[in-house]
Image: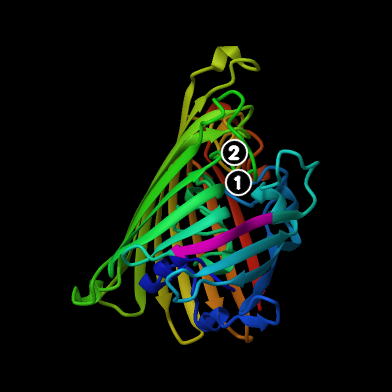
Amino acid sequence: MKVNKWTLGLAAAGLVGLPAGSQADEKLNPMLTAVTPTTVSGYVNTSIHWDPGTGNRVVPSYGLNAPNKADGFNLDVVNLTIEKPLDEANWAAGYKTELLFGQDANAYATQSPTSVGAADFAIKQAYVSLRAPVGNGLDFKVGVWDTITGYEVFNSGSNPNYTRSYSWTIEPTTFTGVLSTYQLCKYASASVGIANTYGPAINGRANPPKAESYKTYLAGLFLTAPEDWGFLGGSAFYATIHNGFNAGTGGGADQTSYFVGATLNTPLKWLKVGACYDYLGTTDDRPVSNPGDNGTTLYANAVTLYASMQAAEKLSFHLRGEYAWTDSTLIAGSNDPSGGFPGGNSEVLAATATIQYDLWKNVLSRLEFRWDHQAGDNDMTGYGGDLSKPASTNGKRNAYLLALNLIYKF
């Protein structure tokens, strides 16, 4: 499975997604075409969920979680990637097409405004890549491309844990536009992009209600510590900002997101740690459908901590702790201010523990336990089934998940 440069950079620091044996995932299969070399790769992602307790109709609202995944067997998603990467030429050109099939494809929500309903299919990426011989080389992606934001990515096998964090949940996912990346020096690179809208819909527009020329803008900086920094050598820091109009957010909203993250090596070679902070602000811009709400500012924040331990060549452990809070009316699973954390909850705590053992070739296998806790006091209803307590008592809610995740990568 091909992973983007940002993910590879995080992996170099040790925490994002290249588990033991996964380096072979980068050895893609050549395909004979008129344009060579073209490569084909992808994965099949399956899972088994057990949600202790009853009444699992309402589940925690982190990204890609859904009630119909609870207490059963799941085909999460199938990924097919066809790509001709850039070579070392000054005027190199290539392309990448990444397709999704299955339930999670619908959640990715890149279907264009003219599409009719969900069909278990989505275009994750489809762009032309170009290089111009400017300084160290200026790379461009023109078309549909992944966000530059995030400690985690959509492709679960490139993350330390199976389930997604609330940080990932409130981040943008994909854009239609132009993204440029420049290697400032050996230890620093920067990206700047312009896109149609903040939302994921391919060929979406901010007009109406915005002017025809209104666009979304984003920028990111990625830093790597030099090798002579001792055990910190290879550690990474990254920061991004996005601003634009999301036409798919309950009728339309201006959105701004900030992200900072770091992955750190430690004196213990078997231990890596990381952290990230996300902010999403939404200004309701729906004067026609909701005139009383026009100009209302909503927000969500999330802080996430990570730790990964390589116990043996094929055995690793991954821990994640989270705290997310909002004004109780914003959720970014769909970036929709008409939703909210579960039951309109304003605060959520979560902890995830993952055991990974690479038993079969090309198969990522892991067992994960997750705990989500409603820490707020806003309309806490229908969450956790028989674990719930009446909202009138300000009772705290808990939900648990035990999941087995198997991913075959080709």
Secondary structure that dominates the magenta span: strand
Q: Residue 209: give x, y in percent of width and height.
A: 59, 23
Q: Which residues are magenta?
A: 123-131
- What distance separates the C-alpha of mark 2 from that of mark 1? 6 Å
Disc 1 marks which amino acid? Answer: Pro
Can residue 51 be seen here? The reply is no
Local packing at callout 2 (Cα closer than 10 Å; few below 14, some 14-19, many 20+) is many
The secondary element bearing badge 2 is classed as helix
Q: Which residue is mark 2?
A: 342
Name which quarter of the figure residue 332 lies in: top right
Q: Residue 278: give x, y in percent of width and height.
A: 41, 45
> Which residue lies at the image location 66% right of the left edge and 70% below the top edge?
82
For the C terminus, the quadrant is bottom right
Q: Residue 295: give x, y in percent of width and height.
A: 49, 19
For the N terminus, the quadrant is bottom right
> Which residue lies at the image location 65% right of the left edge and 63% below the top edge?
98
Local packing at callout 1 (Cα closer than 10 Å; few below 14, some 14-19, many 20+) is many
Disc number for residue 335:
none
Residue 124 in the magenta stretch? The answer is yes
Disc number for residue 60:
1
Residue in front for this viewpoint, 233 or 273: 233
> Which residue lies at the image location 56% right of the left edge and 12% below the top edge?
292
Disc 2 marks which amino acid? Answer: Pro
Q: Residue 266: give x, y in percent of width and height.
A: 28, 72
Residue in front for this viewpoint, 10 or 328: 10
